[in-house]
Image (tube, grey):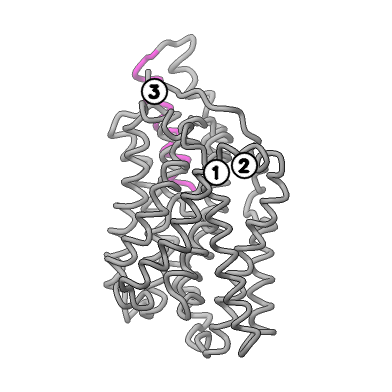
């Protein structure tokens, strides 16, 4: 039986109901509408850009101060699970993103493909992966560690992968842009990690207020990106037909990742609880981490670049909410494998079949 690291109890975020549209998504929609109706330009745009730069740096400082390196390191003994999630996040996703290059220009425009590829490079989520894993009766401790690992690795790996795979399409990557990334993303993150010993308690006590700061910073990033897109006329490239096609491509991407994480983790011999963790942590992407990164990486092209990530985020919430409840509904069937019936192969096979059926019907 694999080792389960001991972790502190955390308050899980409330899961949205079927076809959820949470308050943050509504805030994003409202922010986009505001940028369309009242875009900033001239001196106001300069002030907004400066505020965005400060907000992104502060956001990554908070990320560093919040993430418990000790909790992440406590999960090293369960290295096969974490390595599997990292491979799904930073290897399988990017490979699928590169494969989607064949859709340009017949299905996707080049700017939308750039955004889709960037979506494939960002780290996995933390809070929603934990919440879905808990509802599905998976390995919550492993989900906490997997999310922490992904966030820690993503601060470095995502910009590097973007520089390697996106090239000039990402706004002209150069030594200067990498220095900017280091100063605006990595340096504040490391500062937060170093100061966590002294400010960790304060952040824990004011979690609710700082969560509002988090979301406010992300909304500011979205407003600045979409506002600049309106001023430059970028949104004239976006039609309802192109939006529908993008949604279809992302639905295929999510389906492929859910299938690969489900059947792949079973082939690798993980127990049911760990498979659930891999499905939710390995198939999801972080909007909160991706949006600020995009503002630094893409500059003026950020508005279209972040659209695929925003749509994918809402889609994964909707699909995973349904999937988590279906896994949970079949958990008593799987429990036979570890309770009175013993570890009978046929009992475990029944649980595997039920999980596969739940995934197929989403």
As measured in the structure, the alpha-carbon distance from the residue carrying label 2 to the one carrying label 1 is: 6 Å
Sequence-first disc among 1 and 3: 1
Point out residue 47 in the picture as x, y percentages from the top left corner.
Answer: 63, 79
**What residue sits 38% from the left and 26% below the top?**
271
- Left/right of residue 37 with respect to residue 311 in the rendered view: right
Residue 195 numbered mark, or none = 1
Residue 326 numbered mark, or none = none
Point out residue 95 in the picture as x, y percentages from the top left corner.
Answer: 28, 58
Q: State yes or no: residue 351 in magenta.
A: yes
Magenta residues span: 343-362
Q: Is residue 219 above or below residue 40?
A: above
Viewer-nearest of discs 1 and 3: 1
Q: Mark 1: which secondary structure?
A: helix
Q: State yes or no: residue 202 in magenta.
A: no
Viewer-nearest of discs 2 and 3: 2
Point out residue 282 in the picture as x, y percentages from the top left corner.
Answer: 41, 45
Query: Crowding near pointer 2: few (<14 within 10 Å), some, many (20+)?
Result: some
Instruction: Please tell me which residue lies in front, 360 or 134.
Output: 134
Assign the N terminus to one quadrant of the image: top left
Q: Mark 2: which secondary structure?
A: helix
Quadrant position of residue 254: bottom left
Residue 199 numbered mark, or none = 2
């Amino acid at each position: 039986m694999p080792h389960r690291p001991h972790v502190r109890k955390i308050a899980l975020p409330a899961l949205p109901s079927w076809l959820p549209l949470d308050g943050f998504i509504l805030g994003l929609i409202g922010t986009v509408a505001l940028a369309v109706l009242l875009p900033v330009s001239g001196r106001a745009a300069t002030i907004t850009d400066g505020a965005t730069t400060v907000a992104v740096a502060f956001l990554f400082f908070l990320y560093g101060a919040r993430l418990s390196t000790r909790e992440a390191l406590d999960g090293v003994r369960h290295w096969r699970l974490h390595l599997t999630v990292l491979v799904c996040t930073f290897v399988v996703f990017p490979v699928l993103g590169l494969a989607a290059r064949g859709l340009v220009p017949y299905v996707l425009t080049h700017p939308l493909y750039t955004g889709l590829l960037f979506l494939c490079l960002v780290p996995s989520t933390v809070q929603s992966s934990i919440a879905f894993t808990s509802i599905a009766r998976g390995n919550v401790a492993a989900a906490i560690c997997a999310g922490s690992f992904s966030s820690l690795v993503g601060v470095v790996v995502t910009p590097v992968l973007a520089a390697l795979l996106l090239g000039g399409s990402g706004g002209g990557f150069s030594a200067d842009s990498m220095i900017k990334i280091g100063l605006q993303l990595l340096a504040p993150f490391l500062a937060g990690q170093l100061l966590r010993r002294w400010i960790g308690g304060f952040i824990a006590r004011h979690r609710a207020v700082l969560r509002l700061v988090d979301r406010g910073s992300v909304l500011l990033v979205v407003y600045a990106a979409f506002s600049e897109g309106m001023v430059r006329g970028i949104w004239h490239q976006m039609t309802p037909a192109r939006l529908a096609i993008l949604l279809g491509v992302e639905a295929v991407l999510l389906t492929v990742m859910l299938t690969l994480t489900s059947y792949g983790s079973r082939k690798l011999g993980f127990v049911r609880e760990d498979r659930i963790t891999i499905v939710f942590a390995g198939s999801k992407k972080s909007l909160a981490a991706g949006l600020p990164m995009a503002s630094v990486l893409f500059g003026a092209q950020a508005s279209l670049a972040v659209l695929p990530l925003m749509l994918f985020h809402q889609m994964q919430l909707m699909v995973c909410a349904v999937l988590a409840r279906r896994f949970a509904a079949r958990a008593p069937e799987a429990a036979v494998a570890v309770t009175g019936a013993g570890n009978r192969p046929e009992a475990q096979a029944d649980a595997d079949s039920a999980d596969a059926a739940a995934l197929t019907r989403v």
